[in-house]
Image (spheres, rainbow, N blue to C red):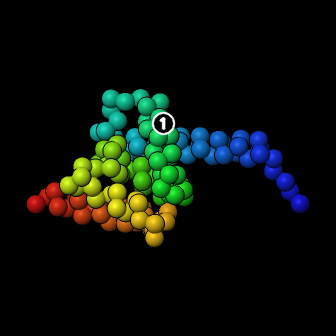
Amino acid sequence: MLSIRDDQFEALSRDLRERFLARFVEHVQAVWPDRVTVITDEAIRAQGEQGIRLAERYDIRREVDVLQFLDLFFAFGWDFERGPPDDGWAQPILSDPQLVGREKVERLCQAARQQLSSGDD
């Protein structure tokens, strides 16, 4: 039986996270070029790290889900998940114990589309 020591698992996790962050920087530069013209790759990575920690807190762990969650930060700002009390559309979704991972992200994206379309009125 193959056994992975804790330090090996930790190293593997760090490597996967670093590769994800590198792809995240490329993604942000391609999808949000107008938002990143004045910030460095290191700043994008730092925002990615912050977003990953927040995603983990909300039990959003799949790479594709984390990436969509991070995109919401670029679309709505780095405090979108809290939002003002009269317009906190994301917090009820994120704090719903019935929703997990992918379900939360799908609901967030649906609510985000509604937010964007209501702003077009």
Q: Is residue 101 visible?
A: yes
Q: At 20% from the left edge and 55% from the top edge, which residue is drawn?
A: 86
Q: Residue furthest bottom?
A: 98
The quadrant holding residue 113 is: bottom left
- For image coordinates 42% across by 53% down, the residue present is 69
Which quadrant is home to the N terminus? bottom right
Q: Is residue 23 visible?
A: no
- The residue lying furthest to the left in this view is 121
Task: Classify 10 Å Cα crowding around label 1: few (below 14), some (14-19), many (20 and above).
Answer: some
SS for dot 1: helix
- Give the side of residue 16 with respect to residue 32, left or right: right
The C terminus lies in which quarter of the figure? bottom left
Q: Residue 106 versus residue 88: which sits nearer the camera?
A: 88
Q: Is residue 22 above or below residue 93?
A: above
- The front one of 99 and 63 is 99
User: Label 1: which residue?
Assistant: 45
The image shows residue 60 at horizontal and vertical percentages of: 50, 57
- Residue at image position (43%, 31%) is 43
79 displayed left or right of 63: left
| Residue 77 appears left or right of 63 | left
Residue 21 x, y percent position in the rendering: 53, 42
The x and y percentages for residue 74 are: 34, 45
Image point (59%, 44%), residue name: 17
Q: Is residue 1 left or right of residue 113?
A: right
- Which amino acid, mark 1? Arg
Q: Is 87 or 18 nearer to us in this picture?
A: 87
